[in-house]
Image (cartoon, rainbow, N blue to C red):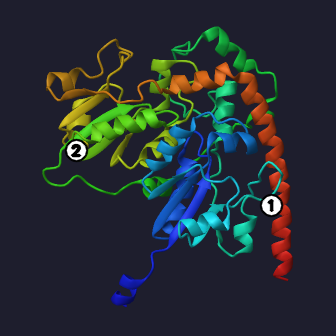
Amino acid sequence: MAQESATRKPVRVWVDGCFDMMHFGHANALRQARAMGDYLVVGVHSDAEVEQNKGPCVMKEDERYAAVAACKWVDEVVKDAPYVTTLEILDQYDIDFVVHGDDITTAADGTDCYQLVKDAGRYRECRRTVGISTTELVGRMLLLTRDHHIRGSRSVRSPIQGVDESVVANFSQGSMPAGSLTGIAHYLSTSKKIIQFSSGREPGSGDRVVYVDGAFDLFHTGHIEFFKRARELGDYLLVGVHDDQTVNAVKGGNFPVMNLQERVLGVLQCRYVDEVIIGAPYSVTKDVLEDVYHVDVVVHGASDQPLDIDGKDPYALPKERNIYREVDHPRLDLTTTAIIERIIENRHVYIARQARKAQKALAEAEAEQREKEMRAALHI
């Protein structure tokens, strides 16, 4: 049996998509796909392909390529993958089968992007994560809602920092009903999902533990580059994620765009992260440095850090212990605020995109229902 396992050809799985604003819903699909085989190849569409078939992306193609590559379940990334999955691309990468969510995705001409591989018997489905999508996140930014926050007792300070408040104010009013923009959803996390995303690895004897903290909202390549460089300073990366009320008290406006549960899952899917403190204090405390694991170094990005709400330096203790370090990385220009500004500056483009997406989603739902009815008829 052992010899048979050693000689068995590894099962190679293909997943493709836009992966715009790479979120934990995308990561969950990749996790499920990876569990179906031994090696996961992910095709990411170019900006031109997405524009033609779906509408403009928020994140540029190089940002989307990097975000997918940083997911811990991904073994290989194929750039500029075709929007309609072909048998030729599967054969080129020696793929056994394709995995996609349990919904239909159509190209610009209305055809099923996976019909060719379905007909060839090289298609499998995974469960789609309900309550999160790129469309949902863009909708939250267009509406500037705080409905997705997990409520607490921290005070709220406004306006939103880093974005012109006079421009932002128009978004809460909007020019379209909320439902046509997004129909704000609420993702409900479970302990099982946290466990599925967790590495389960403890620091070994002599491992150097690195601690970083932040909101890590709209998880992006700036966060990824920061984690990568922080991880290089030790052997084990512990990430503190602040709760919604803490983030909102410091940043104001409708921050965070994603709630605590959503942000934690976004961080956990990153290959450079070993463990997360959920709802970490804004100021680094003795408990953080000693009670979870013994922290050897505390790392922060080379950018301005707002003071805590009591006016104190949140890194005073690690600085006092001489374990505080700052790191640079090549994507300091990419921040959560910068992503929101992309949406704000192109508001009308994204409102039109949301409307087109809503119409496309209706057509895809109808096609999905017809396919289910055909399957049911075949089993009678």
What is the crowding at mark 1: few (fewer than 14 residues within 10 Å), some, or many (at least 20)?
some
Instruction: Describe residue 125's horizontal placement relative to residue 55 as left or right.
Output: left
- Location of mark 2 (residue): 293
Q: Residue at x 46, y 57 (%)?
A: 76
Which of the 4 image quarters holds residue 89? bottom right
Which of the 4 image quarters holds residue 122? bottom right
Instruction: Describe residue 371's horizontal placement relative to residue 197 as left or right.
Output: right
Quadrant housing the C terminus: bottom right
Residue at the top extreme of this rendering: 166
- Location of mark 1 (residue): 368
Q: Is residue 246 above or below residue 25?
A: above
Instruction: Describe residue 272's horizontal placement relative to residue 18 as left or right.
Output: left
Tag 1, which secondary structure?
A: helix
What is the crowding at mark 2: few (fewer than 14 residues within 10 Å), some, or many (at least 20)?
some
Q: Is residue 251 above or below residue 199?
A: above
Point out which mark residue 178 bears: none
Q: Position of residue 125 (x, y in %)?
A: 65, 66
342 or 219: nearer the viewer: 342
